[in-house]
Amino acid sequence: MRILLAEDEPRVARFIAKGLREQSYAVDLAPDGEEALYKASISEYDLIILDVMLPLKNGFHVCKELRDQSIRTPVLMLTARDAVEDRVIGLDFGADDYLCKPFDFKELLARVRALLRRAKELRPEILQAADLKLNTANHLVTRGDRKINLTAKEYALLEFFILREGKVVGRDEIAEHVWDENFDPFSNIIDVYVRRLRKKIDEGFDRPLIHTRRGEGYIFSADMEGDNV
């Protein structure tokens, strides 16, 4: 999942981004409202975390302009102002949720998970393909009776694959959702991570789940034979 974090306080932005990345989210940063609008208009995000007190253009107006542009990405607003009127304004301008500073990071993560589940379609807490199960709450991954230990980026890639089960996904689409804006399109990092993931979830099992479609990308499916198609 790829998240845009619009926060003008560098220390707070680093803290939130670090915590989200440790939970396998790809995070892009915007230090002001204008840059937040620009990034949201050129990239596809799964969630936008928007501080209210942004320079150049405050979070209320950013949220309103996003909705005016028909950008329906879920928006979680952060603010140090806890007046009821401020919360009402944010929600009326199109925000999906509202969290007051200071907050417990666990609560932020819970709200992020809830908004991501709500987006586009209701997603169950447990994702399953064949005998592989992925718990989106605690990131526990098992295949059959074997527990599979994944790094944060491997988990993010697996979640991306399983949510698009049966569909061809290209490297550009993977980069858009699993990596952040610092991704180098000329690197082979996606292929490296796919190989690592294959080794962990396919080796030793009768049925491979990750398949290569030459010249197009990858397919995650339990109903195909072999590797290359």
Image: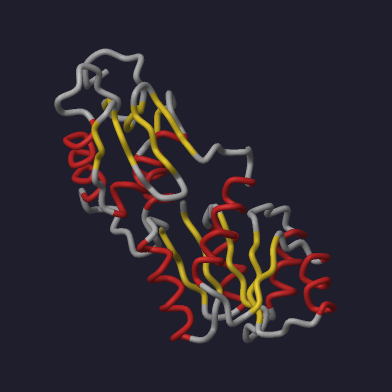
* Percent position of residue 139, x then y: 38, 48
Q: How is the image coloured?
A: secondary structure
Residue under the image location 18 percent in, 42 percent down = 196
Residue 164 lies, in percent from the top left, at: 46, 32
Classify residue 172 by image quadrant.
top left
- Which residue appears at 42% of the width and 78% of the height? 15
Q: Which of 3 and 186 is in front in this view?
A: 3
44, above or below 128, in the image:
below
Q: In this view, does 6 lie to the left or right of 71?
A: left
Give the residue at x 74% y 81%: 82
**Relative to 120, is 138 above or below?**
below
Q: In the picture, residue 89 is in which quadrant? A: bottom right
Front residue of 189 and 145: 145
User: Where's residue 94, x and y in %?
Assistant: 77, 61
Position of 116 relative to 132 (above/below): below
Residue ID at (43%, 23%): 166
Position of residue 142 in the picture relative to residue 29 (left or right): left
- Depth check: 97 or 92 in front? 97
The image position of residue 4, as x and y in percent, is: 52, 64
Q: How many labels does the image show?
A: 0
**Residue 140 as seen in the image, left or right of residue 199:** right
Front-lying residue, 96 or 41:
96
26 versus 78 height, above or below: above
Q: In this view, does 2 lie to the left or right of 67?
A: left
- Work out which residue is located at the far front of the displayed protein and give it: 145
Q: In which quarter of the image is the C terminus?
A: top left
